Image (cartoon, coloured by chain):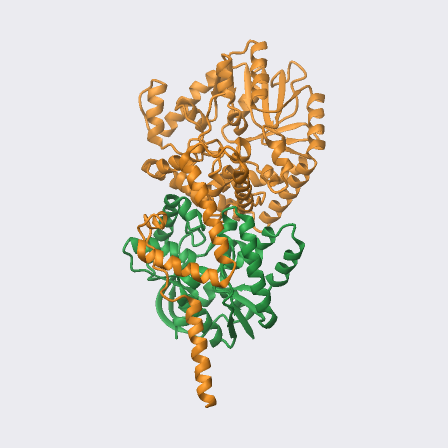
Chain colours: A orange, B green
């Protein structure tokens, strides 16, 4: 597998994002647009919005708590309808199954819809190694693929690119005259992609929801590319994490009201596809084969962790990204893997390993804006706090220490600092002595010293008060007592 | 009514004038204010950074202080939404599985209040009959807004000061980028977020920024002052206490 995880260089990643003026502009425009759109779409629902969120949460709680039951039911239904189910433990397992399918059927071209799960397992890379060309058919994802990049947003993969960037890219890669006219660029991509749709033997999609009672895969989109991906090629492979299953079609109604409003500010997306089985007679439309790949890829471990289980309720709407003050500034690529923003800070360490992504849960001001917009009311800040705790516990026990010497030193200093802080905060005497020492340190070393420069490089820091509140209070009490004494005399 | 002041370590050591203003304000409203010098820090810096064991020890010390105080005081009041949240909400998480301390948290939690909420919801004052001349905008601190659900109370208190022109900033509820240790772990991100906040503040044309948390004020004023701005950053306790 290609190593596409860049979480360890988070600090370098975000610094470069912050100094990229073009990116800053693109992020401001896109996140504002999404946030406003969502706000209006939510307002149109009125008070019912919160009821919907609560209902969705109940459904997810119930589904995740009874995952074995509903997954079993879903899989049985799929097979009853003529589909095949493959249970994949991890990325390698899933990729081997899919590339095997392509090889056995002599398929050399695959069309793909946008799917975070295929990003997660780097399916395109695996297909390429197996000699299968995989073409992304979501416009944003197609742009990102042409550029040799990865998506920077869950629902808007090319959010980091401006119109001019795309014009340059198209003229270079598609060998056409450069144009910034959006209609012309879209028409061009459409022409290229139609050709691919017409000839591909394999269509690969994710799954927004998997309905257990009917064995239905539900796909939500706006461009119609998923409709084509699931109807034109002979073979359809749908990938889904184990958490995607919901019990009944009736439950879907709740999510279909929440998802488009949260994601793109739409009341309804342009297309919603319900895939139930394969064609059963020659006059039917649709693929001859349906393979549903159900992936664990680290999710069973999340399921087993009662403090973090809620991470599995996510429906990948991206609303938490748009509203997050950190994401608004550093964008998606800085997070170093495919899931950015608050949900990425939460999922990535759990999926790629806490030690590889240990900065991410800390890269949040814990402002709670994500929880406020989450359609499932996922308590992201609370779980980030928990993850921080797990990471510190792991770090204390972990051998070997982090590879980077600066990280090792930083960690040691932090642990020592916290120990010193604890000692200082447990008694009045030590607290007051430490405050005096801090005052001395600030006046002797100055605000620009190493002790304070992580604050003062960009912000002023007032001097500690010459007299603390408690000293002022004591004086006042003394004053009051003295005047009382005088009165007595 | 007896009120014990939970001054918070940042106010104690950096902004004593906020603590004094809180005392004076509560006294003017007829409360008998006490202060217990055994108090230190609520433990949030360690909790927030993942060091729960250390945070627990410090929090347990603070529980002793609160229990002692509530033997004679009716309420504990803090000039901070964040430190109040730590005690009322995060202590529950911190002491998970520790029935004894959880019972203590539950017993005191309902009596701990952030200042603006205490004034409006408990003392029932909205209009303090004050006057002052200033163009004021208000920043919602995140814990106060999203954990304690307080947003109308401070605004009412400010708007009811005669002579104050209140201007709502755009995205008043957006984070200032402080985030405790976040502000020094990732100073560039923290500052970039604060830049958005001060742009919102500046767009209002206000001469005074008010908030209920000294930590947010330290972040915002730190950047404003670095930029040479003359916008005053004041805690709501100071604004209310200094008005006549």
Residue at 65% x, 28% y is A216
Quarter of the rendering containing residue B207:
bottom left
Q: Where is residue A282 drawn, in percent x and y?
A: 65, 13
Q: Is residue A373 left or right of residue B16?
A: right
Q: Where is residue A134 drawn, in percent x and y?
A: 49, 18
Q: Where is residue A429 drawn, in percent x and y?
A: 48, 63
Whether B209 is drawn above or below A227: the answer is: below
Q: Nearer the viewer, residue B244 or A282?
A: B244
Whether A64 is drawn above or below A185: the answer is: below
Residue at 44% x, 82% y is A482
Q: Where is residue A441 drawn, in percent x and y?
A: 35, 56
Residue A117 visible in the snapshot: yes
Residue B149 visible in the snapshot: no
Q: Quadrant of the C terminus of chain A?
A: bottom left
Whether B100 is drawn above or below A268: the answer is: below
Q: Is residue B227 left or right of residue B138?
A: left
Whether B50 is drawn above or below B144: the answer is: above
């Amino acid at each position: 597998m290609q190593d596409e995880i860049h979480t360890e260089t988070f600090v370098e990643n975000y610094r470069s994002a912050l100094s990229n003026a073009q990116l800053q502009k693109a992020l401001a425009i896109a996140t504002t647009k999404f946030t406003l759109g969502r706000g209006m779409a939510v307002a149109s629902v009125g008070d019912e919005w919160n009821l919907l969120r609560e209902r969705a949460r109940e459904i997810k709680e119930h589904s995740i708590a009874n995952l074995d039951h509903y997954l079993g039911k879903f899989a049985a239904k799929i097979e009853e309808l003529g589909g095949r189910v493959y249970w994949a433990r991890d990325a390698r397992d899933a990729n081997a199954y899919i590339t095997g399918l392509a090889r056995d059927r002599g398929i050399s071209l695959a069309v793909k819809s946008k799917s975070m799960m295929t990003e997660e397992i780097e399916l395109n890379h695996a297909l390429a190694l197996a000699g299968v060309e995989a073409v992304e058919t979501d416009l944003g994802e197609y742009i990102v693929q042409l550029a040799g990049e990865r998506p920077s947003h869950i629902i808007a993969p090319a959010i980091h690119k401006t119109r001019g960037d795309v014009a340059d890219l198209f003229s270079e890669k598609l060998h056409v005259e450069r144009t910034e006219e959006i209609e012309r660029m879209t028409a061009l991509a459409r022409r290229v992609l139609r050709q691919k749709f017409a000839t591909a033997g394999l269509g690969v999609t994710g799954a927004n929801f998997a309905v257990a009672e009917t064995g239905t895969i539900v796909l939500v989109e706006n461009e119609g590319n998923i409709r084509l991906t699931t109807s034109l090629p002979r073979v359809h492979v749908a990938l889904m994490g184990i958490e995607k299953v919901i019990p009944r079609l009736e439950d879907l109604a709740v999510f279909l009201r929440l998802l488009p409003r949260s994601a793109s500010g739409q009341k309804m997306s342009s297309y919603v596809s319900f895939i139930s089985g394969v064609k059963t007679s020659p006059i039917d439309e649709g693929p001859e084969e349906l393979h549903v790949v159900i992936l664990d890829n680290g999710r069973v471990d999340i399921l087993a962790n009662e403090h973090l289980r809620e991470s599995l309720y996510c429906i990948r709407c991206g609303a938490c990204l748009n509203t997050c003050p950190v994401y608004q500034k550093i964008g998606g690529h800085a997070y170093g893997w495919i899931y950015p923003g608050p949900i990425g800070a939460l999922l990535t360490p759990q999926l790629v390993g806490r030690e590889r992504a240990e900065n991410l849960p800390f890269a949040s001001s814990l402002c709670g804006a994500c929880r406020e917009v989450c359609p499932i009311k996922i308590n992201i800040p609370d779980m980030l706090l928990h993850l921080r705790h797990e990471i510190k516990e792991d770090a204390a026990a972990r051998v070997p220490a982090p590879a980077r010497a600066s990280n090792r030193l930083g960690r040691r200093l932090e642990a020592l600092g916290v120990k010193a802080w604890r000692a200082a905060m447990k008694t009045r005497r030590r607290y007051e002595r430490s405050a005096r020492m801090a005052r001395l340190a600030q006046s002797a070393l100055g605000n620009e010293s190493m002790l304070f420069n992580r604050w003062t490089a960009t912000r002023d820091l007032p001097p500690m008060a010459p007299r603390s509140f408690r000293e002022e209070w004591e004086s006042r009490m003394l004053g009051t007592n003295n005047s009382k004494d005088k009165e007595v005399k | 009514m007896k009120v014990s002041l939970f001054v918070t370590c940042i106010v104690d050591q950096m902004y004593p004038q906020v603590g004094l203003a809180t005392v004076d304000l509560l006294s003017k409203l007829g409360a008998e204010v006490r202060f217990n010098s055994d108090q230190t820090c609520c433990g949030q810096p360690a909790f927030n950074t993942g060091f729960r064991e250390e945070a627990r020890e410090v929090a347990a010390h603070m529980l002793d202080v609160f229990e002692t105080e509530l033997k004679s005081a009716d309420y504990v009041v803090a000039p901070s939404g964040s430190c109040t949240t730590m005690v009322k909400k995060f202590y529950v998480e911190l002491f998970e599985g520790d029935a004894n301390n959880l019972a203590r948290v539950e017993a005191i939690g309902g009596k701990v209040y952030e200042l603006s909420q205490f004034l409006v919801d408990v003392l029932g004052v909205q209009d303090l009959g004050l006057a002052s001349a200033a163009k004021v905008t208000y920043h919602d601190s995140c814990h106060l807004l999203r954990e304690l659900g307080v947003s109308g109370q401070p605004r009412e208190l400010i708007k009811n000061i005669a002579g104050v022109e209140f201007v709502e900033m755009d995205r008043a509820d957006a984070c200032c980028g402080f985030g405790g240790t976040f502000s020094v772990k990732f100073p560039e991100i923290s500052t970039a977020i604060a830049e958005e906040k001060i742009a919102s503040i500046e767009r209002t044309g206000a001469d005074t920024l008010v908030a209920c948390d000294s930590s947010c004020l330290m972040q915002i004023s730190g950047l404003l002052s670095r930029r040479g701005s003359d916008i005053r950053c004041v805690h709501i306790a100071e604004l209310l206490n200094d008005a006549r």
